[in-house]
Image: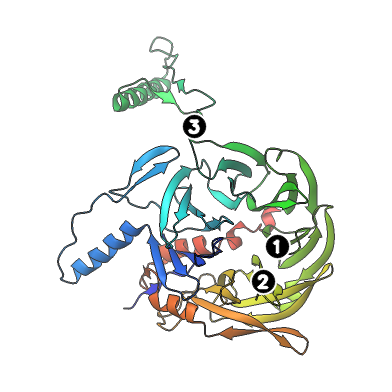
């Protein structure tokens, strides 16, 4: 039986600052990160490369060909500020749900899900990806951003905490020393009950086990082993965060599951709250500040509501119900992307994607209001959206595994012609802009090269795990008994 291809979960268009370098499209699918030439869709690299090579070699060997050569050491990487041997590198993650790129086009920052690690990769001139650092967070991150100066990573987690850390870690001196684990204060003379004696013996065995493993007295780890700061905290899951500069001042905007949008000062004064933007009645799933209108904030929630804000004043300028526009119930906003199409006479649009929906909704900003323009019907659920400067079009990642409109019903069989990427462009219409699907050579090239295989014969439990990693809003949205 033929296999499915892993959909692209995240897309990132990387615009190079040097005129000698071509723009790059970076995409995550399954446990891999891919880089493509934005001009023609040629694949430039797959990360982690040695894993991809060993997988291909194993597949060739199973088909009766010669066995793969002995794996050699390819490179050294750094975990925190410690050198790490990658000769026997085995990924501990299955997907890459978060990704951002630096505005100078030099770095890509990703989250690898199961190991909760924030990894920084350098994007070489030839489009190759090289891992520079890996930092494991104490809780699973749920939001990721870079500051406008490309110097600091901001991470929000599912417990509401926000961290800052340098993009490129240097030497780190711990601010708090490690504490030596004290031996149990109790003894056999002071403990009498059978249960307490068993507990005491268990504590002694654990301490001896730690000391025998290291040859040193057991120590208690009191802090992360890389430079970091806790800069903010919410009372619930952080769902998105943005770092923005306006009128020479920096700000951090954060959204959470409890319908709050907080406007804080930038680093190092994130603890100072400037404003709250209150009005949503469901978890806020996405924030967007258009590049051409930095004083405007667009937010979307799990009830299909869009808000337009003057975020510096905490003032609501407009509220739009996508359920009313599409005449469809149970809509959840998955993504909001500001896109500029063309260079000579640019068209500026806001593209809204929906959770488990094959429709894209497009708006323009006119004055202090969002104006609905058109919808785009895709061949499958939209997963992520980016604007492509090289072609002046919009690139959409499409779910070719599940039925359109569903987050958990898989297609009966793989379709070899089903697109992983689709593109569309804006054209003038009678009542505004119309958006037309294109046969893009870039998308065609990427679709033909494919991604990694996803077995069509997976058991139901494994399918559900993959569904939950791809579509998170349904599980995150509050149920009636939570409210």
Side of 68 relative to 167 (left or right): left
User: Residue 240, position in %: x, y?
Assistant: 64, 54
Query: Which is nearer the N-term, disc 1 or disc 2?
Result: 1
Disc 1 packing (10 Å; few <14; some 14–19; many ≥20): few
The residue sitting at the front extreme is 20
Quarter of the image holding residue 59?
Answer: bottom left
Disc 3 packing (10 Å; few <14; some 14–19; many ≥20): few
Q: Mark 1 and 2 residues: CB-CB less than 8 Å, in contact?
A: yes
Label annotation for residue 291: 1
The relative height of residue 341 versus residue 23 in the rendered view (above or below) is below
Depth check, front residue: 15 or 32? 15
Alpha carbons under labels 1 and 3: distance apart: 35 Å
Residue at 71 percent across and 81 percent down: it is 374
Q: Mark 2 and 3 residues: CB-CB less than 8 Å, in contact?
A: no
Depth check, front residue: 18 or 239? 18
- Give the residue at mark 3: 172
Disc 2 packing (10 Å; few <14; some 14–19; many ≥20): many
Colouring used for the render: rainbow
User: Residue 454, position in %: x, y?
Assistant: 38, 69
Side of 104 relative to 112 (left or right): right
User: Residue 244, position in %: x, y?
Assistant: 70, 52
Side of 198 relative to 11 (left or right): left
Helix, strand or loop under label 3: loop
Helix, strand or loop under label 2: strand
Query: Which is nearer the N-term, disc 1 or disc 3?
Result: 3
Label annotation for residue 340: 2
Residue at 42 percent across and 18 percent down: it is 193
The relative height of residue 346 versus residue 25 in the rendered view (above or below) is below
In the rendered image, which quarter contains the N terminus? Answer: bottom left
């Amino acid at each position: 039986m033929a296999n499915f291809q892993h959909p692209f979960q995240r897309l990132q268009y990387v615009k190079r600052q040097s005129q000698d370098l071509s723009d790059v499209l970076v995409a995550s699918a399954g446990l891999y990160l891919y880089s493509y030439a934005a001009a023609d869709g040629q694949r430039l690299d797959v990360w982690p490369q040695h894993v991809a090579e060993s997988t291909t070699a194993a597949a060739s060997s199973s088909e009766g060909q010669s066995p793969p050569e002995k794996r050699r050491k390819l490179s050294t990487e750094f975990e925190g500020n410690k050198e790490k041997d990658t000769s026997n590198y085995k990924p501990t993650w299955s997907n890459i749900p978060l990704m951002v790129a630096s505005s100078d086009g030099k770095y890509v920052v990703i989250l690898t899900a199961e190991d909760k690690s924030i990894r920084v990769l350098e994007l070489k001139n030839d489009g190759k990806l090289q891992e520079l650092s890996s930092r494991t967070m104490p809780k699973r991150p749920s939001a990721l951003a870079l500051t406008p100066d490309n110097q600091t990573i901001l991470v929000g987690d599912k417990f509401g905490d926000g961290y800052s850390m340098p993009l490129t870690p240097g030497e780190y001196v711990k601010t708090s020393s490690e504490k030596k684990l004290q031996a149990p204060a109790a003894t056999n003379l002071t403990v009498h009950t059978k249960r307490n004696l068993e507990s005491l013996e268990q504590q002694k065995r654990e301490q001896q086990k730690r000391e025998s493993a290291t040859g040193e007295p057991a120590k208690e780890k009191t802090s992360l082993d890389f430079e970091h700061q806790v800069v903010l905290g919410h009372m619930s899951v952080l769902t998105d965060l943005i770092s923005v500069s306006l009128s020479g001042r920096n700000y951090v905007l954060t959204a959470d599951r409890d319908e709050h949008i907080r406007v804080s000062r930038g680093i190092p004064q994130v603890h100072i709250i400037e404003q709250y933007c209150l009005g949503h009645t469901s978890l806020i799933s996405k924030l967007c500040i258009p590049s051409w209108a930095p004083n405007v904030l667009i937010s979307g929630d799990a009830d299909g509501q869009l808000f337009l804000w003057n975020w510096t004043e905490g003032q609501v300028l407009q509220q739009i119900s996508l359920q009313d526009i599409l005449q469809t119930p149970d809509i959840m906003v998955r993504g909001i992307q500001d896109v500029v199409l063309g260079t000579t006479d640019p068209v500026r649009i806001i593209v809204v994607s929906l959770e488990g929906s094959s429709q894209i909704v497009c708006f323009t900003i006119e004055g202090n209001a969002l104006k609905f323009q058109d919808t785009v019907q895709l061949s499958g659920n939209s997963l992520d959206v980016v604007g492509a400067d090289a072609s002046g079009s919009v690139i959409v990642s499409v779910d070719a595994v599940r039925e359109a409109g569903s987050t958990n019903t898989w297609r009966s069989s793989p379709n070899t012609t089903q697109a992983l990427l689709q593109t569309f462009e804006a054209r003038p219409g009678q009542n505004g802009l119309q958006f037309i699907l294109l046969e893009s050579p870039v998308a065609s090239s990427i679709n033909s090269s494919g991604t990694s295989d996803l077995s069509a014969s997976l058991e139901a439990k494994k399918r559900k795990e993959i569904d939950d990693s791809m579509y998170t809003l349904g599980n995150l949205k509050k149920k009636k008994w939570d409210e």
